[in-house]
Image: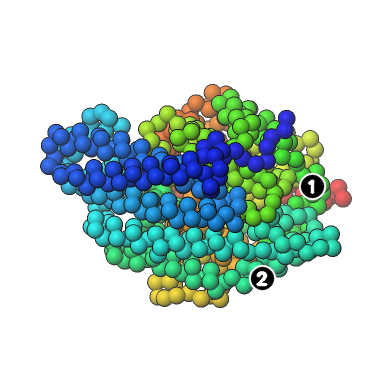
Amino acid sequence: MTYSLTWDLDVFFKGGSSSEEFSLFLESLNQDIKNFDAVVSGWRVRSEEKDQHLLINIIELFAKTGTEMRQAGAFISCLEAQNTKDAKAHGLRAQVTQYSAAFQDALTKLDQKLVQLDEEFYQKILKTPPLDELHYILNERRERARRKLSVEEESLINQLAVDGYHGWSQMYDTIVGSIKIPFKENGEINQLSVGQAANKFSDPDRNVRRGIFEAWENAWGEKSEVLARTLNHLVGFRLSIYEKRDWQNVLQEPLEINRMQKETLESMWEVIANNKEPLVKFLNRKAELLGVEKLSWYDLDAPLPSSAAQNVMRYEDGAEFILKHFSKFGSRLAAFTKTAFEDSWIEAEDRQNKRPGGFCTGFPLNEQSRIFMTYSGTPSNVSTLAHELGHAFHSYALKDIHPLKRSYAMNVAETASTFAEMIVSDAAVKEAKDDAEKLALLEDKIQRTVALLMNIHARFLFETSFYEERKQGMVSAARLNEIMIEAQKEAYGDALAEYHPSFWASKLHFYITGVPFYNFPYTFGFLFSLGIYAKALEEGEGFEEKYIALLQDTGSMTVEDLAKKHLKTDLTGKDFWVQAVGACLKDIEEFLELTDKSNKEA
């Protein structure tokens, strides 16, 4: 079957960034935000019966307006991603960012009203419908508000953030859209977008990879000063807020956002740091297979020599491959995925002016999602596609849950996506027709382990160091390069011959304002999903409904409680993480055995 390589956005709002329908939607959204703010502002808290009824009404308005905000944000994200040159889309982003700030102002007021409620009265009304269903969400907002500044101060922060914080993030997007990577192909020099250039790192020809890496480094290097200033101001803004709130630990906010304890994060990283040796062995073996003494950064995604040709897969074949293996896990996941392909939910075309990377975003008013990526036929592309479909299925699982209980943290979001990846990659390895194919699939699977246990670790180490230096003042582009190389050397066990100093400039995640430390949740999600996957293998057919039940709880409890309820495990200890990392390393053991066998036969 033929599937469209481009997505359908007209089902939401016809006309793209020039959509009159979307303009009317934004006008309505703006009015709803004003109405919500007026109701919250007019609430005079007395801890009486009428407060309960008023709170119920406010919660309904909160859910409605928040859903509309997500719908608007999703549409603009798609417009900007599909065409970085879309100036009207950038203008819409600025407009919705202002709306978001106004909405956050109203929510800040709501949170303070929750704090003002008498404790006994508050606990009493939490036990009555429909507030009883939302007790975790309301408690969370109330407790976080107690740790923040006054309503006036937090409101001022939200207003200043439009131009002083989010504006810098949008500046990054503008800069990235202007970057072109020159690449000589068939005797001609083509100007590639960063998304197109990134795909060249999986080219089987090392000269191509080296050449694109040099051009890549030069391109980001040319923008390094303005990008360094951008990153400094983003982090400086955060640090100023933390100081005013008297938050001593820069991880307080990301841990709160991810509903995660510090002990859990520390246990996870400690176990990973103590198990780098097998990963280094894999990198050394891959270097040997590629005929180099040590891998360089641009070799990390390179296919093995024997697998380069057979690993190219047409988009339709990649889709069918995913559908085949999803169907072995559960009928609902397979049926959902079939709809996503058939109804053009996915933007996969390889073309100019697309932003790099991949994402999934939800359109809650339509109960649909949209997936963005650039597909060029590599096993990694197929994995990315499965990954983003996992995100979409997570949203699908929550469609009948109260809107305020659908806002799950990033770390459990990455659990669903990584779990979907694992279904595809693990089944593919098991069904390989021969050792050569098995080796290629294993290598691709281990690449993701390397990315999540080494690359993400480097990002975490970099940000941890950068934040500390930024407290003392602006950090230069040259120093950022140094911090990045130091982090990469530690995270990769000094296993590479050449590193990527400007990675801090080229990686979008460092510039995202919604979630600080946009790194460790990926690793958490990867390892947590291994625990869920182990359960799936243990229980076999019928586990899908339990999996959906787990996903439905992701927006209304801490990750520690989620693990206790559904996996019967303690995430703050090391046992779970030792088992999870051990499961990753089994792939490496098998890879080393297979390549030993191949070397002996040769």
Whole-percent x and y of residue 409? 43, 45
Q: Which residue is mark 1?
A: 307
- Mark 1, residues whose alpha carbon is within 10 Å: few (<14), some, or many (≥20)? some
- Real-space CA distance between mark 1 and mark 2, rounded to the nearest whole angstrom: 30 Å
Residue at the outermost right position: 602
Q: Which mark is residue 502?
A: none
Q: Residue at 55% of width from left, 61% of height from top?
A: 174
The disc, 1 or 2, on the residue closer to the chain's N-terminal end is 2
Whole-percent x and y of residue 574? 46, 48
Q: Residue at 48% of width from left, 33% of height from top?
A: 366
Foreground: disc 1 or disc 2: 2
Tell me the kind of residue under disc 2: Asn
Q: Tell how many labels.
A: 2
Which of these two is toward me, 350 or 453? 350
Helix, strand or loop at mark 2: helix
User: Is residue 266 something one can see in this rendering?
Assistant: no
- Mark 2, residues whose alpha carbon is within 10 Å: few (<14), some, or many (≥20)? some
Which of these two is toward me, 599 or 412? 412
Q: Residue at 34% of width from left, 57% of height from top?
A: 158
Q: Quadrant of residue 50?
A: top left
Whole-percent x and y of residue 351? 69, 51
Q: Quadrant of residue 201?
A: bottom right
Whole-percent x and y of residue 434? 80, 38
Q: Is residue 450 left or right of residue 573?
A: right
Q: Residue at 26% of width from left, 38% of height from top?
A: 58
Q: Is residue 23 left or right of residue 351?
A: left
Q: Which residue is mark 2?
A: 218
Tell me the kind of residue under disc 1: Ser
Q: Is residue 198 left or right of residue 225?
A: right
**Colouring of the image:** rainbow
116 to 221, vertically: above or below: above
